[in-house]
Amino acid sequence: MKDVALLAGVSVKTVSRVVNGEPGASTAVRQRVLGAVERLDYRHNLGASTLRRKDARSGIVGALLQDLGNSFSAGLLRALEDALREPGLSVLAASLDEEPERERGIVSDLVARRADGLVLMPATHRHEYLISERRAGLPVVFVDRRPHGLDCDSVTVDNHGGAKLATAHLVAGGHRRIAMLTDLEEIETAVERRAGYRAALAEKEIGFAPELLVHDIRSEMAAAQAVTALLDLADPPTAIVAGRNIITVGTVRALRAAGAVREVAVVGFDDFPMADLVEPPLTVIRQDVQQIGAEVARILLDRLNGAGGPPQHVVLEPTLIQRGSGEIPPRRPG
Amino acid sequence: MKDVALLAGVSVKTVSRVVNGEPGASTAVRQRVLGAVERLDYRHNLGASTLRRKDARSGIVGALLQDLGNSFSAGLLRALEDALREPGLSVLAASLDEEPERERGIVSDLVARRADGLVLMPATHRHEYLISERRAGLPVVFVDRRPHGLDCDSVTVDNHGGAKLATAHLVAGGHRRIAMLTDLEEIETAVERRAGYRAALAEKEIGFAPELLVHDIRSEMAAAQAVTALLDLADPPTAIVAGRNIITVGTVRALRAAGAVREVAVVGFDDFPMADLVEPPLTVIRQDVQQIGAEVARILLDRLNGAGGPPQHVVLEPTLIQRGSGEIPPRRPG
DNA sequence: ACTCGTGACGACAACGATGACGCAGGATGG
DNA sequence: CCATCCTGCGTCATCGTTGTCGTCACGAGT
């Protein structure tokens, strides 16, 4: 910038004025400065600028999601990006992969970068470590999972209601032996979905069969193996609720391998792009990622605009999309 | 930092030493400083730090992809993130949506942020505007599309070869009336794929039928409509090469609507998660996003480590994954 | 002619941090 | 006992930019 000032024959402050489009520079000077900028390939240094400025917005928002490669996180990221672009915010995205250490590391990196806000799909279970950041005025919005030990905004989906909806739908279809497959015990959404499943069974007065509730399933392969084992039971399930994206895939794959794809009903949690083209077309519980992302962005932007008030906890209702796999009737025993 | 120094009874420089883990601070002083840091909730300011430092690495890499919500971009982002995490780099991700203006805007933002490097899946067709950045030492790696008017690293897929492979596979299956659907005329990968299709036809001495080559298809719906129109031809195609992810989806949907899903062969470009569960299972040309991402990261890290030398142009070969949809034989005429 | 306002611009300090250097005091070697 | 080195820490300038305030010229109003 000094060089530009020298070449244009003005002071650095004037260059600053021109670069920032501030008033107080005549057209002639402006032209000279812009010419010099061009000739010297000068680039404004945003870091130094935010350092000096009073309000000091870095223009960065951190998006700490579970896995940027899966369609849920990716869709959410995209929705966030769209809503944050207009106000001039950039998104620094990271995958946490359920690793608490990574979460803490990336959060502290973002704090050091003076991010304007954080969107967090936490891998940790306790969030007290964020209290000091919140007190310092950092807006944090939790997504998909609620904060614990920390009072701050969140946008979640009614997992309990969603799983209940799925299970009740199968019961209404005549099923009594309904299995459920979920992720790690310690993941909150998985716990809620299990609870929803049990609540639906209880409401319909169907006994809970422990052997039909399988958890700690972390991959497609694990899901497929679990399903294969379930089918080998003396009294196998006639329907399955798949607690998550990849579990649904593994489930369908196992059913297909067993030739049971038209015999056992399936309802998956989480919709995905080609679910209607699978055979049979998949009935799913859909969480609207667009809407989730838009809500998160709305809350974050409000906070950035100085909105005070108590934390908001938005809970969105998932919907049941019937496509066929969930409407397969139970096989008549014997 | 001043406050911390005051509370700990030392100079700011000493605080700096402790915070950065530099030698030259006794254990006693270190403890006092860390205590003060804790009490005052002091956070290191990375912006100020990189401003002052000589080497001035911001630790940010920009990833400008087409659409973070689609599985190709998302997978690529994930692969990049994984490779860049270890050397301590964060990824600032953005979707370009084929909009040249957006590309320029985001690039200039990243330059102003002093990003350490750029990964670019360009929406623009000419890249001279990056010459000055390159000269200033900014590493830029193009991905999926080659640079034009600029000599810099790139990692691409052999689109011509991939499309040729798909087409030849259908020809080998006995097809003669093979349609191809591609994206916008101006998108380079689409152009290459069309060329590969025509090359395969020419090589097998099959006449090119203009009515079977449809382009400027931008959505699932457009693809579906195009396919429906193709089926209504007097001499409809017996096989279709779908030039892209969403085109494949639209194609399958239209075939299904027409009840022709077992009559017309389909080979799609780009694999996706549940392609084997679709009915019929989809034969596709797969681009290995993991590998692409890893190559991009490798080149970028080399450049960051000061590797000189001429630009590298890595071209990866896509592979044909046979699953069924591409192996449907042609319907016997009449 | 004098004041006064206004617009264009510059001088200077400061944002938060670190590099270069300096200085005191104790350990070391001859 | 002195020269020398090392350790531990402080002082100062500086990174690139902008907020604050001052200066100067010029035109208008009386």
Image (cartoon, coloured by chain):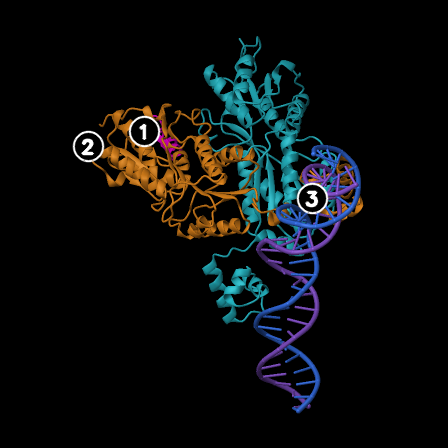
Chain colours: A cyan, B orange, C blue, D purple
Q: Which-is-in-front pick, marks 1 and 3?
A: 3
Q: Are marks 1 and 2 on the same chain?
A: yes
Which is nearer the eye, B283 or B252?
A: B283
Amino acid tagged 3: Ser
Q: Earlier in the sequence, mark 1 or mark 2?
A: 2
> Left of C16 or right of it: where is B133?
left
Which residue is tagged 2? B205
Q: Residue at x 41, y 34 (%)?
A: B249
What x and y, as percent, mark residue B216? 35, 44
Which residue is tagged 3? B16
Q: Which residues are magenta?
A: B251-268
What x and y, as percent, mark residue B333? 23, 28
Q: Quadrant of residue B198?
A: top left
Which is nearer the eye, A240 or A17?
A: A17
Q: Residue A269 in magenta?
A: no
Which residue is tagged 1? B264
Q: Is residue A214 above or below residue B179?
A: above
User: Chain ID for label 2?
Assistant: B
Q: Earlier in the sequence, mark 2 or mark 3?
A: 3
User: Chain ID for label 3?
Assistant: B
For label 1, the SS is loop
Q: Residue B263 in magenta?
A: yes
